[in-house]
Image (cartoon, rainbow, N blue to C red):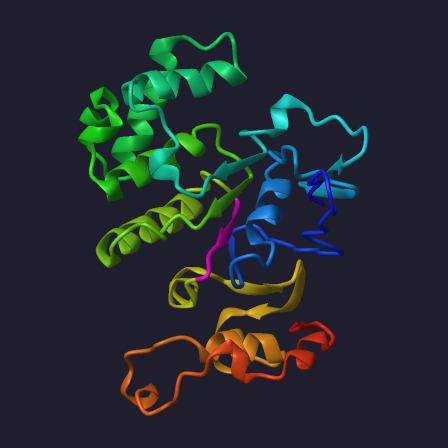
């Protein structure tokens, strides 16, 4: 809930998501549907005016209560669950070299780590994932947009989190850079650098290439969830159908299909019960 000082706004209500090991869960929906709010809650970085009333997060059998007076151990942030923030390319200090950012991240979670240990881990991770080691000596402005995004992704996963919440990581990238970042995320999953990913976006074609399953959000709740191909090819909930119908697709079989705007649909249909595909 967002406390605004006037009318309080319920942003996410009665939402439950499950991510299996090795899975990418795509979280889709229009702007304002609650995607980023849910991502902030799951990644344990919710800050005022956002307040969590009630909830819980279970990872590897360990349960962390959320909301109220619940205290979140520092060891959960970054190591158990980590956030790759929206606008990640602008989320790092322009006055520090990447090596200093790496050390700050590692040091904030382990006071005993030395600078050499932190940089050795980062250097190994960077080269393993196809970036040159010289990235560590660069300032953010000396990196291209795609390289900066991949570097921030690596910094976000230095502690090998069980779950990575990626909030629109491809939104500011060109198609080639999007492809490289997606391939890197999938490689990191394969190498078990993290065990699962929640990939938040409104770009449905991107989800088709990266997600194992898709959950569609509307007005703070999940209205449909299921395997990617089924969600894309045979959506059942009226809102999901509307969302899919708004996508421009280059394939020949879709070129004669009229793109429908959301206003052309009966809004009362969006009160239909949620659809969960097994």
Q: Considering only vertical position in the picture, is 206 above or below 199?
A: below
Residue 146 seen in the current view: yes
Residue 2, percent across and down?
Answer: 69, 43
Closer to the camera in the image, 265 or 103: 265
Residue at x 78% of width, y 41% of height: 53
Q: Considering only vertical position in the picture, is 55 above or below 110?
A: below
Residue 31, percent across and down?
Answer: 51, 58
The quarter of the picture where the C terminus appears is: bottom right
156 to the left or right of 33: left
The quarter of the picture where the N terminus appears is: top right
Residue at x 75% of width, y 42% of height: 56
Residue 230 seen in the current view: no
Residue at x 39% of width, y 38% of height: 88
Residue 125, percent across and down?
Answer: 33, 31
Q: Considering only vertical position in the picture, is 273 above or below 199?
A: below
- In the rendered structure, does residue 196 fall within the stretch colored magenta? yes
Magenta residue span: 195-202
Count every numbered label the image shows and give the total: 0
Closer to the camera in the image, 134 or 263: 263
63 to the left or right of 146: right
Q: Considering only vertical position in the picture, is 165 above or below 245?
A: above
Name the residue furthest front.
6
Closer to the camera in the image, 11 or 75: 11
């Amino acid at each position: 809930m967002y406390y605004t000082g006037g009318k309080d706004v319920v942003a996410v209500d009665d939402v439950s998501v499950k991510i299996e090991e090795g899975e990418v869960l795509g979280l889709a929906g229009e702007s304002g549907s609650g995607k980023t709010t849910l991502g902030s809650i799951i990644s344990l970085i919710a800050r005022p005016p956002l307040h969590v009333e009630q909830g819980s997060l279970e990872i590897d059998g360990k349960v962390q209560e959320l909301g109220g007076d619940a205290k979140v151990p520092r060891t959960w942030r970054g190591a158990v669950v980590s956030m790759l923030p929206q606008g990640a390319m602008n989320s790092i200090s322009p006055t520090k070299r990447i090596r200093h950012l790496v050390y700050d991240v590692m040091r904030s979670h382990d006071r005993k780590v030395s600078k050499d240990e932190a940089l050795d881990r980062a250097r190994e991770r960077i080269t393993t994932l196809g970036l040159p080691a010289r990235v560590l000596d660069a300032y953010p402005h000396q990196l291209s947009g795609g390289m900066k995004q991949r570097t921030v992704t690596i910094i976000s996963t230095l502690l090998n989190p069980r779950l990575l919440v990626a909030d629109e990581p491809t939104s500011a990238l060109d198609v080639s850079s999007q492809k490289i970042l997606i391939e890197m995320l999938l490689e990191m999953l394969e190498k078990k650098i993290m065990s699962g990913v929640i990939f938040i976006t409104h770009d449905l074609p991107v989800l088709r290439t990266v997600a194992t399953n898709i959950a569609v959000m509307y007005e703070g709740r999940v209205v449909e969830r299921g395997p990617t191909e089924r969600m894309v090819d045979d959506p059942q909930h009226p809102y999901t159908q509307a969302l899919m119908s708004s996508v421009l697709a280059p394939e020949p079989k879709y070129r004669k299909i009229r793109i429908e705007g959301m206003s052309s649909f009966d809004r009362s249909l969006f009160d239909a019960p949620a659809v969960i595909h097994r």
